[in-house]
Amino acid sequence: MDSARRPAIAVTAWADGSSAGWAPRIAISRSYIDAVEAAGGAPFALPPLDTAALRALFDAADGVLLTGGGDVAPQRYGEQPMPECGAPDLERDAAELQLAQWAVEENKPLLAICRGHQVLNVALGGTLYQDIPSQLDTPLNHRGSTERGVRGLPVHVLSVAQGSRLADAVGAGDHPANSHHHQAVKELAPELAATGWSEDGVIEALEARSASWVVGLQCHPEEMWRDHGWARAVFEAFVREAAFAAAQSEPRVVGALKPAESR
Ligand code: MN
């Protein structure tokens, strides 16, 4: 496996609304790129694209990472938006929901972080709390700190279930987790299992019940891996699965000459 090429990891990017005054940009938080690269993967940015273009890059990827971001349009899970729900990005919703469905159907390794964890649940038929402070009675501040430079600081526990894929990667039991979300999984999609929780019972980790390595995390391990071994282990397990998937699909040699017979 050492001589094999690094697995290509598609990391979802988005239209950057903060680029006013400049030509419109596609953006991605660098921490995702750095975390995948450090774990041995070869990350590339996958922007929202039409279905055919999205499919081409999905096929080129050995694994898919759904990144954090704004709120999924509640209409996607059969609800009308509450006032507390953020403005939707319909283009991004469409692309990422499609990627999640393909990955689950076709056993492609998928790591889904924060918004991605929520996208994965919605893609498979689950629902979300649109706003934790107004819908859940919890003493925890899942929004976390908004100060610059402290996005990696733990604010609650991630309690990982024994026997889960996540436990295989990081160990069962309690790990310190950061938290930067105001929405959460409400009804879990039938194809998913909850595998991690914060102290208040919010679903902070989930995974596919199928054989594929499809793991969602509500926290942001990409902001924690430099200081927390468990967060690094998440990316290492994901990249290892992607490398395994890549090795299964090789060699892609076609039409090789058979010298003795070809004369
Ligand atoms: Mn949280």
Image (cartoon, grey):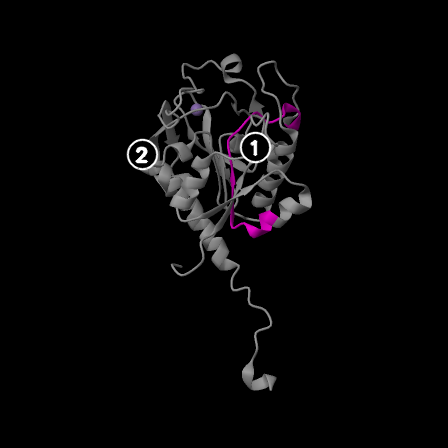
Q: Which residue corresponds to the image point at 64% horizontal and 18% vertical from the top-left?
A: 81
For label 2, the crowd category at 10 Å Cα-Cα, with few meaning under 14, some 14 to 19 and many 20 or more, is: few
Q: Nearer the viewer, residue 231 or 127?
A: 231
Q: Vertical placement of 200 versus 174: above or below? A: above
Cβ(mark 1) to ligand 1 < 8 Å? no
Residue underneath mark 2: 227
Tell me how many marks there are.
2
Q: Which residue corresponds to the image point at 40% horizontal and 23% vertical from the top-left?
A: 148
- The amino acid type found where label 2 is placed reads Asp
Q: Nearer the viewer, residue 20 or 222?
A: 20
Q: Image quadrant of residue 200?
A: top left
Q: Nearer the viewer, residue 262 or 85?
A: 262
Considering the numbered disc 2 on the image, is that residue within a helix, a strand or a loop?
A: loop
Image quadrant of ligand 1 equals top left
Q: Vertical placement of 256 versus 241: above or below? A: below
- The amino acid type found where label 1 is placed reads Val
Q: Which residue corresponds to the image point at 59% horizontal and 47% vertical from the top-left?
A: 58
* Residue 254 percent location from the top left of the image: 59, 69
The answer to whether one can see residue 163 in this image is no
> Residue 119 — which label?
1
Q: Quadrant of the C terminus?
A: bottom right
Q: Quadrant of the N terminus?
A: bottom left
Q: Is residue 66 magenta?
A: yes
Residue at mark 2 to residue at mark 1: CA–CA distance: 27 Å
